[in-house]
Image (spheres, rainbow, N blue to C red):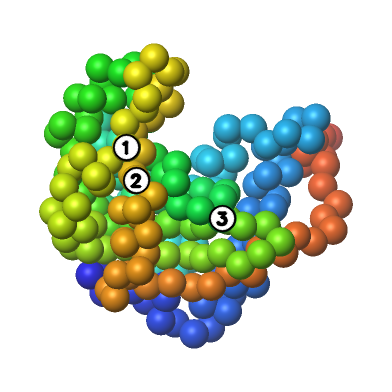
Amino acid sequence: MDGKVKELFTDIQLVRKIQNKLPQFFQLAELESSRAGKVGMEVGSLREKILIALVIYKFGEKNVETQIPITEPEIDVRLFGNPISIKTITWKTFGGVKLSWTVDAKSALDFSEKYAPACDMLFIQINWGEKGGFFYIPKNVQIEIFRQMGRQSYIKLPKPGTNPRGVEMSAEAFVKLLEHKNSLKIEIDWKKKDIAFNAYTRWVELWEQD
C-alpha cells in the first residue's frame, strides 16, 4: 500500500472536503459534457481531471506527474513516481469497469492474455440520489485477488459477435477488491444541487477580453 495515497483517506479535513465537493464537481462535469440533456463520453476525461486535481491539491504539483505516454494505457497519473489508475462508474452494481478500451475481438483477447495488475487504483462509484464511494485499491490487493480467482474469472471479455468496447473486470472480482481489508473507502452521498450553468459563458467572456 502506498503511504502517500493513503493520506487522501486518512486526512479527516480532506475527507470531509471530498465528501462535500466531489458530488458538486462531478455534477458540473456532467453539465459541461452534456448536449441536449445527454451526457457525452468526454465526461470520463473531466472526472479524471477532477481527481488528478485533488491529488495535486493534496501533494503539490511537483510531486504529481500528469503527462503519461499513451504507451502506458493503464496509468493515468504518477504520485511520487508511483503509478495510479483512475476509474469511475455510474451504477449501483460493480460490473462494467474497464481494464482496457479495445477496438476488436483480437486486441481484446491479446490484452486479456498479457494482463496483470500493474498499479494502484483510485475508483469512484457514482450513484446519484443514493450512497456511493471513493475507493483506494492497492496494487498488491489486485494481484492477490487476480491470483486467487485466476485470469478467466477476473477478466470479462466482450461477447463474440458483438461490438467490443473494451475488456472489463468481472463484477465478482471488483466486489472482492472493494471488500478487501486493505482497500480504503470514503462514503459519498451523491446529491445533486440546483446549479446555474452555461457552457458558453466562460468562452464568451474570453472573447470579450482585449
In the image, which disc is placed on residue 30? Answer: none
Q: Which residue is mark 3?
A: 92
User: What is the quadrant of residue 30 in the picture?
Assistant: top right
Q: Earlier in the sequence, mark 1 or mark 3?
A: 3
132 over 153 or under it: above or below: below
Determine whether label 1 and label 3 are within 8 Å by CB: no
Please identify the quarter of the rendering in which residue 63 is found: bottom left
**Residue 12 screen position, x and y as percent:** 49, 85
Q: Which residue is mark 2?
A: 170
| Image point (73%, 34%), residue name | 38
- Specify the amino acid type for callout 1: Lys
Q: Residues within 10 Å of mark 3 (few under 14, many from 20)?
A: few
Q: Is residue 200 left or right of residue 122?
A: right
Q: Is residue 82 left or right of residue 59?
A: left
Task: Say whether disc 2 or disc 3 marks the residue closer to the N-terminus.
Answer: 3
Residues under labels 2 and 1: Cα distance? Answer: 5 Å
Q: Are marks 2 and 1 in contact (CB under 8 Å)?
A: yes
Horizontal side of residue 88 vs 115, given as left or right: right
Where does label 1 land, which residue? Answer: 156
**Distance in Å between CA atoms under marks 1 and 3:** 19 Å
- Looking at the rendered structure, the secondary structure element under dot 2 is loop
